[in-house]
Image (cartoon, coloured by chain):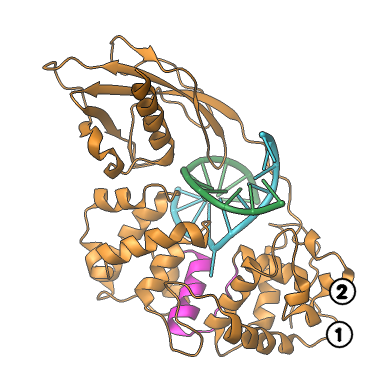
Chain colours: A orange, B green, C cyan
Amino acid sequence: MPVVQHSIHNSGDIAPALLAHYDAHARTLPWRTPPGQGFANPYHVWLSEIMLQQTTVAAVGTYFHTFTQIWPDFAALAAADDADVMAAWAGLGYYARARNLLKCARVVVVEHAGRLPETEAELLKLPGIGPYTAAAIAAIAFGQRAVVVDANVERVVSRLFAIAPPLPQSKPLIRDAMDSITPKGRAGDFAQAMMDLGAGICSVRAPSCQLCPLAFACDAKRLGNPEIYPAKTPKMAKPQRTGTVYWIQRDGHVWLVRRDNKGLLAGMRALPDDQWTARLDGHKTPPVPSKWQKLPGQVSHVFTHFSLLLDIAVTAWPAGADDLNIGEWWPLKSLDKAGLPTLFRKAAEAVMRAGERV
DNA sequence: GACCCGTGGTT
DNA sequence: TAACCAAGGGT
């Protein structure tokens, strides 16, 4: 028995109505097979699901294309250089996903003969695959019945059943309700149909109930206030931090370092900094003594849990002088290939703009 | 369970 | 514009 009692209409009516709508209106996406044409390539399903974690379809598009061109299968990706993969991921965010992507590909090749396991429980053991992704891959790539719950499903289901408690408290209720409406057959299409519905019709602020194939069964619509679901517990305000990055230039090259493998922007190529963090401002001490010049203005950047105002200090390193400690001279002409996270790319652009005015 | 982890689009 | 949000996972 579902925990949530649905009123008036039978929960069994929901899946057929949604699947019929999906057959006619499914989005065409690079990693998706049209409804009724078999299952999609598991490598494509897995890669897209990792990229889509907390990331919009539009942002993923070009990255998915690039990755499948360079690394067309698990074997190719498992054999890739870590630095190449991290650089290819640069700009997409949540860089732990890229490290886990590589780990996962190598586990699949070494321990599973280059093929993904097909059960939710086995998938869940792999790096970077959590409850959502395990269920999504099992259903979409392998046709298994799995209860797939992402942010779209949370919104659609909380409205269908008018689930009042706020997230994340309501997660178990929502999962049980999703379980109660997930069909035995076509669980993958059903999951994707729910996500399409959430991404389009059942939108966050102004749901288009007139177009919704589930309006007949929706408690929130019946109550007249679908937009209030799901309620959420308020989030803490982001702290504002300040920090500095240091631009050391010599003979058409800039000095880049590699960040620690833990914490913010872990493992990514970067400009040297004054050790600002989410909790503390930078100490404004340059990495090496030199004649530093501060660029006018600041670069602003917003991370998940704090905002940063960044100063940029510039110096020219004498030709012929000793190299710096740990890092590499990177040619300015190919700076776009360095795989810099967006924050450092913004800083580099600010330096270039300042240089044009000189 | 709380906290950490990016980025770009939308309103 | 500031706030909210997205096919969440790891620790």
In the image, farthest residue toward the top: A291
Compared across the picture, whether A279 is left or right of A332 comes to right
Q: In which quarter of the image is residue A354?
A: top left
- Which quadrant would the C terminus of chain A be assigned to in this image? top left
A1 vs A357, nearest the viewer? A357
- Which quadrant would the N terminus of chain A be assigned to in this image? bottom right
Q: What residue type is labelled 1?
A: Ile
Residue located at (42% from left, 34% from top): A346
Residue located at (25% from left, 23% from top): A249
Q: Mark 2 lies on which chain?
A: A
Q: According to the image, label 1 marks what residue?
A: A8
Q: What stretch is highlighted in magenta?
A: A128-149
Compared across the picture, whether A165 is left or right of A79 comes to right
Q: According to the image, label 2 marks what residue?
A: A222
Determine if marks 2 and 1 fall on one subunit.
Answer: yes
Specify the label residue A67 is tagged with. none
Q: Which chain carries label 1?
A: A
Characterize the local packing of mark 1: few (<14), some (14-19) or many (20 or more) Cα atoms within 10 angstroms.
Answer: few
Residue located at (76% from left, 69% from top): A159
Q: Which amino acid does label 2 sit on?
A: Arg
Q: Are marks 2 and 1 in contact (CB under 8 Å)?
A: yes
